[in-house]
Image (spheres, helix red, strand yellow):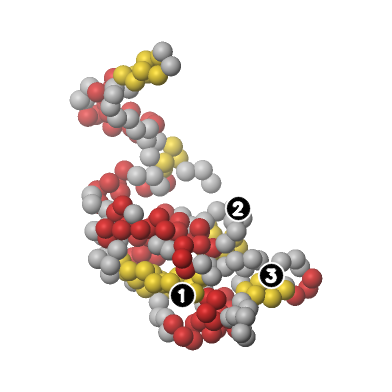
Amino acid sequence: MKNFEIITLFPELFPGPLGVSIFAKSLNKFWSMKTHDLRTYGIGNKKVVDDAVFSGLPGMLIRPDVVMNCMQNINFTGKKIFLSPRGTLLTQKKVESLILEHDNFLLLCGRYEGVDQRAINYYDFEEISIGNYVIAGGESAAFVLLESLIRKIPGVVGNDGSFENESFVNDEISEDRYTRPAKWSVDNKIIEVDQILLSGDHAKIQEYQKNSRKKIKD
């Protein structure tokens, strides 16, 4: 069983897309999820969680003492990850190493301009980025990371053999793929699947698939 905990200002977003299809079927069987509402640990009667950034930079930042209040109450032991554009870029190799090496994960979702760096460093959160772009908060990034991790848990995907030919195996993007109808009629045109794929000649089919794969760009 792999266990995932999420610290977020918006716990109502979860499980979100992880509450459907194979993820819903495997929830509480092969993996579990728990959310922690960061607002609960805010300061004062108004439960304030953020404050202005020092040095005059614009925006608001989640306070370190709010993160501390949360961490002291949840008593977590395991792999801690902060979703951040400053982090190491998420790759399939990283996903596979994480799921192999850890059973318990804690994901911290930032908002506004992020989280005070002292809290990230003190609690030893590894910073991971899902790409070189900016989004409004860490929740969407958390879903990307969670989905990539959960699908690699044995038993979640019905046929583990499907992993062998998917993208990013051997530093390649998967080949072009087709299904029925072999002759597709669209806008008064007939677009056919290459006859090699219908030939039954496995050697030629494998060569065709090999040639249609793309190397991962740096």
Q: Quadrant of residue 165?
A: top left
Q: Position of residue 159 (x, y in %)?
A: 23, 49
- Residue 36 circle label: 1
Q: Nearer the viewer, mark 1 or mark 2?
A: 1
Q: Up-down: is 21 above or below 85?
A: above
Find the distance from the CA under tag 3 to the CA under tag 2: 19 Å
60 on left or right of 6: right
Dot 1, crowdedness within 10 Å: few (<14), some or many (≥20)?
many
**Tag 1: residue type?**
His
Nearer to the camera, 192 or 209? 192
Residue at 29% over, 24% down? 181
Give whichever of 189, 208 is nearer the camera. 189
Dot placed on the residue nearer the N-terminal end, 1 or 2:
1
Image spot of residue 16 (x, y percent) = 42, 58
Q: Amino acid at mark 2?
A: Tyr
Q: Is residue 208 above or below residue 93?
A: above
What distance separates the C-alpha of mark 1 from that of mark 3? 21 Å
The answer to whether residue 19 is left or right of residue 118 is left
- Image-based side of 11 in relation to 199, left or right: right
**Picture coordinates of residue 107 (x, y %)?**
47, 69
Report which residue position mark 2 lands on.
Answer: 133
Label of residue 124 in the image? none
Asked whether residue 126 is in view, the answer is no
Secondary structure of the residue carrying tag 1 is: strand
Q: Residue furthest top?
A: 188
Q: Are marks 1 and 2 in contact (CB under 8 Å)?
A: no
Please say whether residue 205 is visible from this viewpoint: yes
Nearer-the-camera pick, 191 or 215: 191
